Amino acid sequence: MTKYRSIVILTGAGVSAESGVATFRDSGGLWEQHKIEDVATPEAYKRNPQLVQDFYNMRRRFLDTVEPNAAHDALAKLEKGYAGRVVVITQNVDDLHERAGTHNLIHMHGQHRQVFCTACDKTTGWQGDLSVDHICAFCRAIGTTRPDIVWFGEMPYYMEMIDDALAGCDLFLSIGTSGTVYPAAGFVSAVRRLGKAHTIEFNLDASDCSAQFHEHRHGPATQTVPDCVHQLLGEHP
């Protein structure tokens, strides 16, 4: 594989699924036995903040039971060893990329291990459970701190930074994404419009936007991603 100046990698639920992290799309639209509209919208939080806090407390605790897999490790290795620029944009809200060692990372949908206050907009790292009566450490407001997760109907984070990265890349990799959630599903078309980047999709099966990629690698991410990284680094697997 030829050398590229700037590699942008989009990762989705399929990367973390092999570590045991449940996806939004499992079991007919349920996520851990909850309807998405009951736990992942601003309206749900207004309607039943206790349910939503309990749900994300459960997901936060669950992170302690899973580990990065070979795909996470390979991407961290690529960032460390590649001569060009490597940027990982993730739709995932877990911390497995960080724990594997990736640093140049954009969490476009937020993070389980962060919370923010709706009164003062301050964000802070968070490890334990969060209650509906939590007092913000910054503004002292009560009950205004929520999970730092981009819910359905909210604007993803860092879109200007993401647009700049996509505009400057000459290799775009999409790993473990369904191609159904926008704006991430539109990244490949944005890259293709510029006409200068090679695009590769990594997935178990074809996604909703597979036709827009130059190349497809089907199979578990724990196999296909390390193989690609070996090629990019000029190594023999």
Image (cartoon, helix red, strand yellow):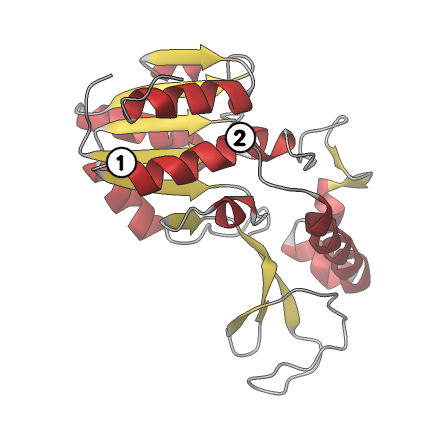
Q: Are marks 2 and 1 in contact (CB under 8 Å)?
A: no
| Quadrant in the picture for residue 66 | top right
| Residue ID at (21%, 29%) | 170
**Residue at image location 19% in from the left, 38% down from the top:** 168
User: Residue 43: x, y in percent?
Assistant: 68, 55
Looking at marks 2 and 1 on the same chain, the residue that comes earlier in the sequence is marked by: 2
Kindly report the distance in space between the C-alpha atoms of the residues bearing marks 2 and 1: 17 Å
Residue at disc 2, secondary structure: helix
Q: Is residue 86 above or below residue 26?
A: below
**Residue at figure coordinates x 29%, y 24% from the top left:** 232
Toward the viewer: 229 or 89?
229
Front position in the image: 190 or 86? 86
Q: Is residue 148 above or below residue 188?
A: below
Q: Is residue 157 visible?
A: yes
Q: Quadrant of the N terminus?
A: top left
Mark 1: secondary structure:
loop
The residue singled out by tag 2 in the image is 70
Q: Residue at x 48, y 36 (%)?
A: 73
Label placed on residue 82: 1
Disc 2 marks a residue whose amino acid type is Ala
87 and 209: which is toward the camera = 87
Q: Is residue 210 above or below residue 154?
A: above
Q: Quadrant of residue 14?
A: top right
Q: Amino acid at mark 1?
A: Tyr
Q: Quadrant of the C terminus?
A: top left
Q: Residue 201 in the image: state x and y as whole percent.
A: 41, 19
Q: Is residue 232 left or right of residue 152?
A: left
Residue 104 position within the rendered picture, expressed as x and y whole percent measured from the top left? 35, 49
